[in-house]
Image (tube, rainbow, N blue to C red):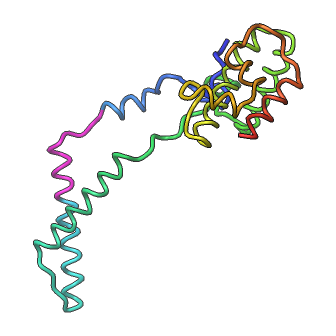
Amino acid sequence: MSDGGLDDLFGIADTPRTAEETESVAKRRSIAVTLIGNGVVIGLAAVVITAGLRALDTSISLLLLVSLLIGLRMVIYAATLVAPPPAPRLRSRIGAGTQPTGDALRAAVRRWEQNLDRAHSDPDLYARNVLPVLAELADERLRLRHGFTRAGDPRRARELLGDDLWSALSEPGRRALKARDVETYLDAMERL
């Protein structure tokens, strides 16, 4: 059984990398090869730009041109360092070797509908799967809209969430889930 986190909600897999991905990570180029490659690219760009400018009867200092190209390459390198990681791959429940089909959001909603249906009769499932996700969503909503979480400022969080949702999230207990309770909790989170 899963712990009911947001990764489970959206079906993000924590599967190990494939052999190709591991190989590509292991094949890191050495610093010397990287510097030589960058030098060649900068040299070729300088030759092309100089030839283009001379064809237009314009000249530029070669030192200035090379400095500008080195600066441009450094900016590009810095941008690649802060680039976001690649999007996670979604789990496929069809089979291990097949590609995932269908809409991932629809599959996540269907999975949550099933969890909520089962939570009506199983209080343990409700406490394990539904409440932790509601708590994460409430904390995220508080953080985005008001700049704090339930743990950071419990008094203000209790005022904003309301007593019903606050008590359900802070003292989950083992009571059965009722549809009107979930509606009340979601209405309280939407009011944030």
Q: Residue at x 75, y 11 (%)?
A: 125
Position of residue 148 in the picture relative to residue 125 (left or right): left
x and y percentages locating residue 184 in the rendered image: 83, 29
x and y percentages locating residue 145 in the rendered image: 62, 43
Q: Residue at x 16, y 85 (%)?
A: 59
Quarter of the image for the C terminus: give it: top right
Q: Is residue 100 visible?
A: yes
Is 127 located above or below residue 144 in the figure?
Answer: above
Is 137 located above or below residue 51 in the figure?
Answer: above
Please tell me whether the stretch drawn in magenta is mainly helix, strand or loop. helix
Which residue ends up furthest to the bottom in the rendered image? 57
Nearest the eye: 97 or 9: 9
Is 73 located above or below residue 101 in the figure?
Answer: below
Nearest the eye: 191 or 75: 191
Q: Which residues are magenta?
A: 27-39
Position of residue 54 in the picture relative to residue 103 (left or right): left
Quarter of image, res 93 = top right
Quarter of image, res 160 = top right
Q: Is residue 90 magenta?
A: no
Quarter of image, res 94 = top right
x and y percentages locating residue 91 in the rendered image: 63, 28
